[in-house]
Every structure is written in structure tokens, then in C-alpha cells.
Image: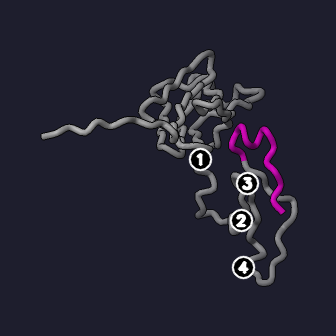
């Protein structure tokens, strides 16, 4: 059974090690551990020294998405992210927000008493509830809050076309 990730796990992109060992039927499976990463169970992440377990993971960005009759609005906290480190890609039916929050390298790791803020890369891809016009989208950052406005495509819009004689 997959447990829902905690707020802190979603915010930081951390993973949860399962308390129970999976039942093994052969000796090779006995050294395998079950790991939950981004809400998905991954097998075989045990004590393998050659695995890339220590490599940096990309965190999932938390968002609010709501709609009005004419547009879809996305809000997310990006405090501490320089605009050059932010990339927003929009299609008619999806949006991807990707960025990187860079850590202050002037502080030694030994000097931290508590270090809970997330530093590193993050991203989020969302399917949109309706088609939007990417060319008319706008993004505004205010006090660390990113607001993206996506105008909906009006499928009922009609245009009269005049016929020209040549």
C-alpha cells in the first residue's frame, strides 16, 4: 500500500524508507530494500555501492491551480529563486515549471544547527483542465509568489469571413 507523502516530504522532495523489509524468496532479494520515491515504490535500492543513490534528486514544486470563466491561474512559492534560474514551458494543454534555488555557499555545513530549507532543482508538470493560448500567457512574481495567468481558448468564438473576388 502506498502511503501519502507528508507535507515536508513533498516540500523538500525527500524520500521515505519503508520500515518493513520486503519478503524475499531468494538470497539476492534479501539484500534488496523497498524505497518510496515521489510516491512510487522502487525495488533494488539496497546496499549496492555502485548505485547512484547519492545523486541529487529533483524536488516536486507545490502549486495552487484554479480557474475563472476566462483564464486558468497557477500560483507557487519561488522565494529565493533568481528569474534566470526559472523556466516555464506552456503548451495548449500542459505547463512545466522548472527551476533551481541556489544555496549560499559561504556557510560551512558544520556551522548549521538546523537546515530545513530546500536548495537545488525542482520542477512540476501539470495537465491543464482546458486548452489555453500560450502566446497570451503572463507570469508575475510578487514577494516570492509566482502567479501565472493562462487565458482559455474560447471554442465558441465565431468570426465572419468576407469572400474577396479576384
Check disc 3 and report its element: helix, strand or loop. Answer: loop
Viewport quadrant of the N terminus: bottom right
- In three-dimensional space, the C-alpha distance between marks 1 and 2, rounded to whole angstroms, equals 34 Å
Check disc 4 and report its element: helix, strand or loop. Answer: helix
- Mark 4 vs 1, N-terminal side: 4
Disc assigned to residue 127 = 1
Q: How is the image coloured?
A: one colour
Mark 1 vs mark 2: give the one in front.
1
Check disc 2 and report its element: helix, strand or loop. Answer: loop
In the rendered image, the residue lying farthest to the right is 20
- Mark 3 vs 2, N-terminal side: 3
Residue at image mark 3? 39
Give the percent coordinates (x, y) of residue 112.
72, 27
Disc assigned to residue 46 = 2
- Mark 1 vs 2, N-terminal side: 2
- Mark 1 vs 3, N-terminal side: 3
Judge by depth and name the residue closer to the eye, 65 or 107. 65
Q: Residues within 10 Å of mark 1 (few under 14, many from 20)?
A: few
Amino acid at each position: 500500500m502506498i502511503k501519502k507523502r507528508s507535507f515536508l516530504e513533498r516540500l523538500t522532495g525527500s524520500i521515505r524508507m519503508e520500515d518493513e523489509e520486503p519478503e524475499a524468496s531468494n538470497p539476492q532479494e534479501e539484500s534488496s530494500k523497498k524505497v518510496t520515491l515521489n510516491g512510487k515504490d522502487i525495488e533494488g535500492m539496497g546496499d549496492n555501492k555502485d548505485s547512484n543513490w547519492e545523486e541529487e534528486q529533483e524536488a516536486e514544486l507545490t502549486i495552487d491551480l484554479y480557474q475563472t470563466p476566462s483564464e486558468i491561474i497557477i500560483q507557487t512559492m519561488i522565494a529565493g529563486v533568481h528569474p534566470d534560474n526559472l523556466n516555464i514551458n506552456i503548451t495548449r494543454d500542459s505547463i512545466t515549471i522548472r527551476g533551481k534555488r541556489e544555496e549560499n555557499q559561504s556557510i560551512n555545513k558544520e556551522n548549521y544547527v538546523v537546515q530545513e530549507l530546500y536548495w537545488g532543482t525542482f520542477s512540476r508538470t501539470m495537465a491543464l483542465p482546458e486548452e489555453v493560448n500560450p502566446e497570451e500567457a503572463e507570469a508575475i512574481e510578487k514577494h516570492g509568489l509566482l502567479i501565472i495567468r493562462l487565458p482559455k481558448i474560447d471554442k465558441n468564438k465565431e468570426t465572419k469571413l468576407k469572400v474577396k473576388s479576384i
